[in-house]
Image (cartoon, helix red, strand yellow):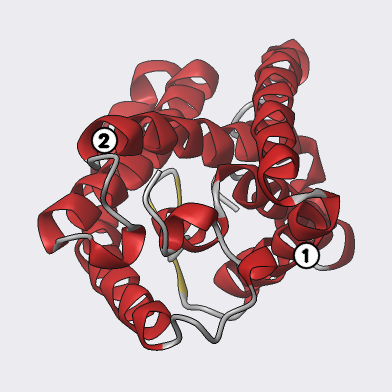
Amino acid sequence: MHIEPGLVDGAKITLSYATAAAAGATGLWFARETVKERGLMSLAVRSVIAAVLTFVFFEILPTFPVGVSEVHFILGSTLFLILGAGPSAIGLALGLLVQGLFFAPADLPQFGMNVTTLLVPLFALTALARRLIAPGTAYIDLKYAQVLALSACYQGGVVAWVAFWAIYGMGTEAFAPIGTFAVAYLAVIVLEPLADLAVLAGAKALRGKTPPTLVEPRLYASA
């Protein structure tokens, strides 16, 4: 998880309930769009896939404590490109919740902050994709520069929210460790586009063999 226990506590933590509620409502709106496109079963299956992958990101991939938080390889843009915004939002929240309930119960009080930190950048990424990617372009045909921009948007949003919560909880004492954390996160911004391109190349090779209900419609077809 991104927000460490004790970073924000007392009455201040109430703010996280409001931000998480807003993020959750936005995620449900995107989920409704997914149901309209491919049906409820597609949303459910893709959300489960996203939840499993989120759990893998947190519990299996390497994690490095740095500054005010930890550096995780959370491949938010990868989830978005393959599974779509709605399923990715649900999967990120579910994966985070499962980790907290069964593997890191001390992190549960920070759930609102952590889910906000993961979901709001996803929605910003979704908005950027609509502006950055031409309507006639399928995701499997994206160029490195486009994928890099999407990754930078998501990971930059994560860093921004971690910085916000740290300053909110610690004040100016958080400035130095925030800087250390942000510099360390540059590695994720560099590596994630490569992972995205590799996954998209795999998806391209599987074109025509992948059940449509398992992936974002835009992956193969233009909007």
In the image, 134 versus 128, the foreground residue is 134
Q: Quadrant of residue 68?
A: top left
User: Amino acid under label 1?
Assistant: Val
In the image, 87 versus 206, the foreground residue is 206
Is residue 80 at least partly visible in the picture?
no
Disc 1 packing (10 Å; few <14; some 14–19; many ≥20)? some
User: Amino acid under label 2?
Assistant: Ala
Q: Quadrant of residue 3?
A: top right
Q: Earlier in the sequence, mark 2 or mark 1?
A: 1
Q: In x, y percent, where is residue 110? A: 71, 37
- Residue marked by disc 1: 45
In screen coordinates, is 157 left or right of 166? left
Number of marks drawn? 2
Q: In x, y percent, where is residue 160? A: 36, 31
In the rendered image, the residue lying farthest to the left is: 145
Disc ID at residue 176: 2
Q: Quadrant of residue 204?
A: bottom left
Is residue 94 at least partly visible in the picture?
yes
Label 2 residue SS = helix
Q: Name above or below for residue 109 compared with residue 2.
A: above
